[in-house]
Amino acid sequence: MLTTLIYRSQLNLSHPSSELRELVERAKLRNSKLSITGVLLSRGSEILQILEGSEESVVKLFHKIRDDKRHSGVVELMRDYGPRRRFENVGMLLFDLQIQSPKEVLQSVLRYSKLDSYLVSDDRVFKFIQTFITDQRPSSVEERYDPTKWTLTTETLPPGASLGLLANQPCQFALQPIVEPSEGKISSFEALIRGNDGGSPEHFFSSLEPDKIYEIDLQTKAYAFALAEKLGIGNHKIAVNLLPMSLVNVPGAVAFLADQIKKHGLKPEQVVIEVTENEMISGFNQFNSAIKQLRAEGIGLAIDDFGSGYAGLSLLTRFQPDKIKIDREIVSNIHLSGPKQAIVRSIISCCSDLEITLVAEGIEKLEEWCWLESAGIRRFQGFLFARPQLNGTGEIHWPHLVR
């Protein structure tokens, strides 16, 4: 299948001009044998390359490029399929913006195009090319957050061991911190529900009678607040996940939460209710009144797994939560994905305008944290920093600059 792949990167060469031309000459021979066309645009160390050929050959070559130490910050921008080639099968073309003007480069690229001229203006590949040629913005990743310059140090949080369960407790909770690495502090803890066998939330809820799910979902939050009291979380916030319809279908649900918060020595402002966008939109009109009651009590609200459903932006036009947690699918390997980066930048801009706190969840790699931190996100949750600890708190890993 004919495939077009576009990526950007920085080239690490001791003699950029001469070494780049040598690389292009070698690539021309290699690509010709594989029936791959490479269109490489260069502006100093910054490059944009279009690879066109069979899917197997293009993907294999791209993986080789990504592993090449002469490239850094390799980000895939687009992978597309088509019925015919956009460019002549010439192996490799180099266009150097330090030698040619943007107008000359664009005209040169178009000479090799096989598309009819009227199709070029709407073609995404040529839009990427034109943007790179005319755009003078520097790379968005700050040197301060180069992942090769960071390491992790371990701290054990008190009490460091699991606490016992209360009498007749139907479930357990695992605590996972939400951290601000740049400040070296914990902003809150999320209490993640587990079965008494340590099983997942899905396993716990699947064991309940369907007509009891909302009632039990609400009641279990009392045990999360009790755990927070036993651990002595101080001024930290605690977040709990709740099915939105638990607030609607259980009479006096908000009053129950408020009573349990007070009973266990917490302040309403310390508690954040997390709901997912899919759950909210299914019964939003009913849930909206519960939101008002939560606000009146001083309890916070967050949208969890933002971006995993279909209604996230629509929800933000109808109400604004205190916090949004970006879904792990979006932030996973974000340092390698141009589409994910563009989406997260738009979320950051939107939440900045609306003064909504952002949390990136599911962080497992230093590279992910470095990109997100450089983009402006300050709060994080994930295995990179700490794993959930059943009925207690465990180790936390802080990033530190290597001196």
Image: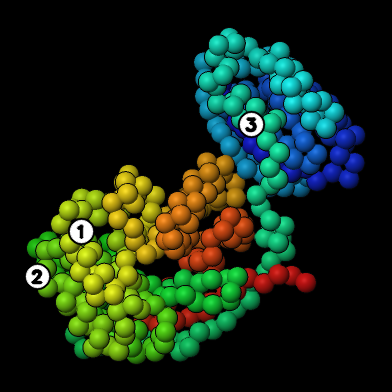
Q: Name the residue that disc number 2 marks.
A: 251
Residue 125 occupies which quadrant of the picture?
top right
Up-down: is 249 above or below 75? below
Q: Position of residue 10 (x, y in %)?
A: 74, 43
- Kind of residue at badge 1: Asn
Up-down: is 270 above or below 113? below
Q: Which mark is residue 288?
A: 1
Q: Which mark is residue 315?
A: none
- Of mark 2 and mark 3, the one earlier in the sequence is 3
Residue 159 appears in the rendering: yes
Residue 373 occupies which quadrant of the picture?
bottom right
Residue 195 occupies which quadrant of the picture?
bottom left
Q: Position of residue 273 (x, y in %)?
A: 30, 68
How many neighbours does mark 1 have within 10 angstroms: few (below 14), some (14-19), or many (20 or more)?
some
Q: Position of residue 397 (x, y in %)?
A: 57, 74
- Kind of residue at badge 3: Thr
- Of mark 3 and mark 1, the one earlier in the sequence is 3
Q: Name the residue that disc number 3 marks.
A: 131
